[in-house]
């Protein structure tokens, strides 16, 4: 049975060589950990400021339903700190606004700075 899986076992880093019983060294060309970019406090501030601006905006009673729904979608992601979700929906959500208020523009600018993309 071990002979059947020997090729796969040899591919594992730090695996025991089935034939010789010696341990292989981990290759330095293959990273064993994933590098994750550090998020600085300044970048996190952009998310907080965007959330604060949108929290003020959601209190408005004169928002059209499509704008209110788009606003809630982005705000939900900000409250949950789900950066992946925000990254996927924020541009489309802000496209729903026909005449954005100052709070919406401020939130857009902060998200633009956080994600570092230009339109």
Image (cartoon, rainbow, N blue to C red):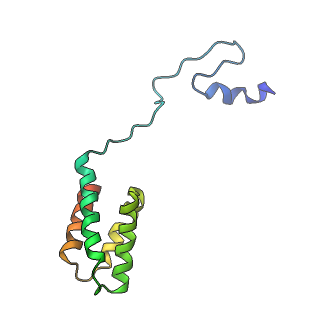
Q: Is residue 118 visible?
A: no
Q: Is residue 70 left or right of residue 60?
A: right
| Residue 48 occupies quadrant | bottom left
For the question of whether residue 23 can be seen, the reply is: yes
Asked whether, in this view, residue 40 is left or right of residue 11, the answer is: left
Horizontal and vertical percent for residue 10?
64, 24
Q: How many numbered marks are there?
A: 0
Query: On the image, which quarter does residue 91 sit in?
Result: bottom left
Residue found at x 81% / y 27%:
1
Q: Quadrant of the C terminus?
A: bottom left
Judge by depth and name the residue closer to the eye, 35 or 17.
35
Res 45 → quadrant: bottom left
Q: Residue furthest right?
A: 1
In this view of the protein, which residue sits in the foreground, 116 or 72? 72
Residue positioned 40% across, 71% down in the render: 73
Residue at left 78%, top 25%? 3
| x and y, in percent, of residue 116 in the image | 26, 55
- Residue 12 against residue 74 in the figure, above or below: above
**Percent of width and height locating residue 4:** 77, 29
> What residue is rendered at 29% in x and 56% in y?
115
* Residue 72 vertical position relative to residue 61 in the rendered view, above or below: above
Q: Position of residue 24 (x, y in %)?
A: 59, 17
Out of 1 and 115, give the one closest to the viewer. 115
Name of the residue lying farthest toward the left? 102
């Amino acid at each position: 049975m071990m002979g059947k899986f020997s090729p796969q076992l040899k591919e594992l880093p730090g695996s025991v060589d089935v034939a010789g019983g010696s341990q292989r060294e981990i290759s330095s060309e293959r990273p064993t950990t994933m590098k994750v970019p550090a998020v600085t406090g300044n970048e996190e501030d952009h998310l907080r400021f965007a959330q604060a601006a949108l929290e003020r905006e959601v209190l408005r009673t004169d928002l059209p339903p499509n704008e209110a729904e788009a606003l809630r979608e982005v705000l939900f992601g900000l409250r949950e700190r789900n950066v992946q979700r925000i990254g996927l929906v924020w541009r489309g959500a802000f496209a729903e606004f026909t005449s954005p208020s100052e709070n919406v523009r401020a939130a857009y600018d902060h998200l633009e700075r956080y994600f570092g993309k230009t339109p």
